[in-house]
Image: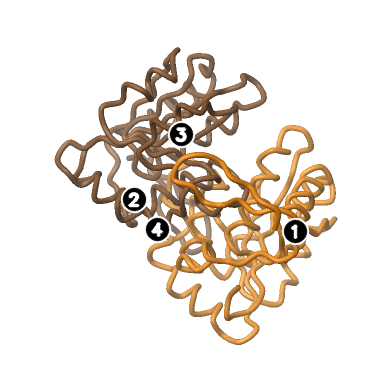
Chain colours: A brown, B orange
Amino acid sequence: MHDGGEVVVLRYGHRPGRDDRMTTHVGLTARALGADRVVLPDNAGGPAETIRDITDRFGGPFEVELRADQKAAVRNFGGTVVHLTMYGEPIQTVEASIRETHRRPSADLLVVVGGEKVPWELYERADFNVAVTNQPHSEVAGLAVLLDRLFQGAELDREWVDADRRVVPMATGKRVVDA
Amino acid sequence: MHDGGEVVVLRYGHRPGRDDRMTTHVGLTARALGADRVVLPDNAGGPAETIRDITDRFGGPFEVELRADQKAAVRNFGGTVVHLTMYGEPIQTVEASIRETHRRPSADLLVVVGGEKVPWELYERADFNVAVTNQPHSEVAGLAVLLDRLFQGAELDREWVDADRRVVPMATGKRVVDA
């Protein structure tokens, strides 16, 4: 849906059971708000299945990948790394630079969303450590604001391919039709 | 932080244990992104305590309220009711109307974030049923995008009062100082 390279969201760390819902929401938010792919730790098989199931029903393209070595995935990523952290620079001061980086031809972007404790080397590898406010809140909220600002709202008009069903927007009520 | 009336976020429904983290993230997102108050069901005492604790440490003003009757709270709200739902009208088509409504003097706004099944009367009571995409994703992500668009980014520059500590934005690293 975008001009530049691929946008990948990587969920750093996952505790099975305890983090299932948050990790699922990270993946579904990535899909709904314009990312191309989510990379989850390989112990997040449950969330991966849920996200794939939603993609089967509501459309894609969107990929879910399970990877054992998250550190290597970040370290070896061949593009710009954006790390979401409440300790980073304000999104309103760095978003234009991130958008510019991403508009270059085939300039892939990796958005790292912390789960468990994030190692120091990730702060160093990141091209941008970005804070959506320097307040503690939610990695899902931070990801949503980042993607909405990265795509400047264009993600909301995305067309979905190979969906089984489609929600028809309504002022009052619920309507779902076959796609 | 805003010109209009109060902005209140109401979390509709809560299952203790299972929803604790999501409800906490709804409240913390409301606080971080410019709302004045969050209303939680009265069985969400744990999340309420966490959100109050963050407010004590990182500043306010921000209020957490527990209410037994969520239906009555919505029905009797003396202002505009915005209901976040994937079945609603696209945010990009209604956001200007919502902002305009809220800019009137003392025009309070209630943002309802669904948890368990939301009753039909809530769709009818809502002045705006709003979808942040018509895709299934996360109520926390939807709330974040709605608040960021309602305040048009002004929430990111909010000053906090009575904080114990403050995060200093850094390009690389973590720095927290006494406030």
The answer for how far apart the CA atoms under marks 4 and 1 are is 32 Å
The answer for how far apart the CA atoms under marks 4 and 2 are is 13 Å
| Rendered image quadrant of residue A17 | top right
For mark 2, what is the residue? A150
Q: Which mark is residue A123?
A: 3
Query: What crowding class fits label 2: few (fewer than 14 Cα within 10 Å), some (14-19), or many (20 or more)?
Result: many
What's the chain of the residue with tag 2?
A
Q: What residue lies at 54% left-to-right and 45% top-to-bottom?
A: A87
Q: Which mark is residue B39?
A: 1
For mark 4, what is the residue? A93
Q: Is residue B24 above or below residue A106?
A: below
Q: What's the residue type where badge 1 is placed? A: Val
Q: What residue lies at 62% left-to-right and 68% top-to-bottom?
A: B81
Which residue, as the protein is rendered here, is positioned at the far left?
A105
The answer for how far apart the CA atoms under marks 3 and 2 are is 20 Å
Q: Nearer the viewer, mark 4 or mark 2?
A: 4
The secondary structure type at the circle numbered 1 is: strand
Where the C terminus of chain B falls, by quadrant? bottom right
Taking depth in this image into account, of A128 and B130 the one nearest to the observer is A128
Marks 4, 2 in one chain = yes
Q: Is residue B115 above or below residue B77?
A: above
Marks 1, 2 in one chain = no
Percent from the top left, x then y, of residue A167? 41, 47
Percent from the top left, x then y, of residue A147? 39, 47
